[in-house]
Image (cartoon, rainbow, N blue to C red):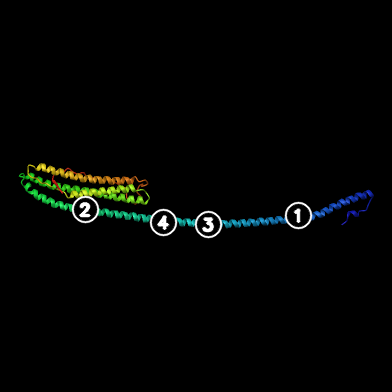
Amino acid sequence: MVYLWNIPKVGTTDNKITKTMNKKLFSAVLAVSLVMPLVTWAETSTEKESNGSEQIRETLKNEAEKLREATKTSLEQKREEVKKQAEDAREQLKQDAERLREAAKNSIEQRREEFQKQMESTRERFKKDMESARESAKKALEQKREEAKKAIEDIKDERKKETVKRLDQNLTETNTRMLLRYTANLDQLDRVVINIVSRTNKAEARGLVVAPVRTALATASTSLASARAAIVAQSGKTYAVVITSSTTAKAEIAVIRDTLKKDLKVVETAVKAARDAVHKAATTLASVNGIGEHEPGEEPKATSTVPVTPAPTPTSTATSTQ
């Protein structure tokens, strides 16, 4: 290296200028020689810092990606677990509901069968009581006819005599025929009641309020029992044509005819009361909030429109005996 201060001197002034320039150049060179390493170091340091920051960012990015993947996997697992638990819970609820429905259905069917058996038992007992009353009435009728036989034979007019005998038979047949019709009316009402009871049980199983229906059914059952009792009582009555003489026969026959009509009217009233009570139970059931229409497989809506045969006006008469 050639240093500037080794340049030959020209003159004093020139030397001074030269010295001054040499000093400035020296200072500049020195500054450059001192700054250059710093710049180089700074550049190296900045590059290292940049590389380090990039590595840190890449590391953080990788860690964040791993965390996201781990979180995603965990959430998927939790979601699957919750989904499985929900499905299991739904299936369990479905099975429990099915068991409850089956239990309720079995209970309703059992109650229906028990009620049907009870009704059948009541009808059987009624038939036996009616047969017993009819047998007793038959014996009493034969006795009454035997007692009236002499008075009838005393009638001189053969046509009138045959008419009296025919009327005697007609009154008995009319009583029997009407009682059978009233019994058929009650049997129809029994079937309506069974229908109402079945629908009431199902409504109760659904949580509906059926207490008023139960009360109406109790009243209907009482009315039906009263009507059957009236039929049994009427079965035990006889209407033999008993006359004292041919001159009083017409009036005596009229009395017997009116007696039969009044007695049958009592039975008719009892049967109508039973029909009205059953109708009340049916309308009470229909008014239950939420009862709706019957479901598939369920019996139709209960109805009590059962006609009651009115008591006839007998064309013949007889006296009534218990």
Which residue is identified by label 4? 96
Q: Amino acid at mark 4?
A: Asp
Closest to the camera, between mark 2 and mark 1, is: 2
Which residue is at the front of the view, 128 or 21?
Answer: 128
Q: Amino acid at mark 2?
A: Lys
* Sequence-first tag of 1 and 3: 1
In the rendered image, which residue does mark 2 sit on? 127
Label located before the other in sequence (1 or 4): 1
Say which amino acid is labelled 3.
Answer: Lys
Q: Residue at x 84, y 54 (%)?
A: 30
Quadrant assignment for the N terminus: bottom right
Of label 4 and label 2, which has the lower sequence position?
A: 4
Residue at which label 3 appears: 78
**Sequence order check, earlier mark of 2 and 1:** 1
Say which residue label 1 marks.
Answer: 42
Q: Is residue 255 left or right of residue 95?
A: left
| Kind of residue sitting beneath label 1 | Ala
Residue found at x 90% / y 54%? 5
Helix, strand, or loop for circle 1?
Answer: helix
| Earlier residue among tags 3 and 4 | 3
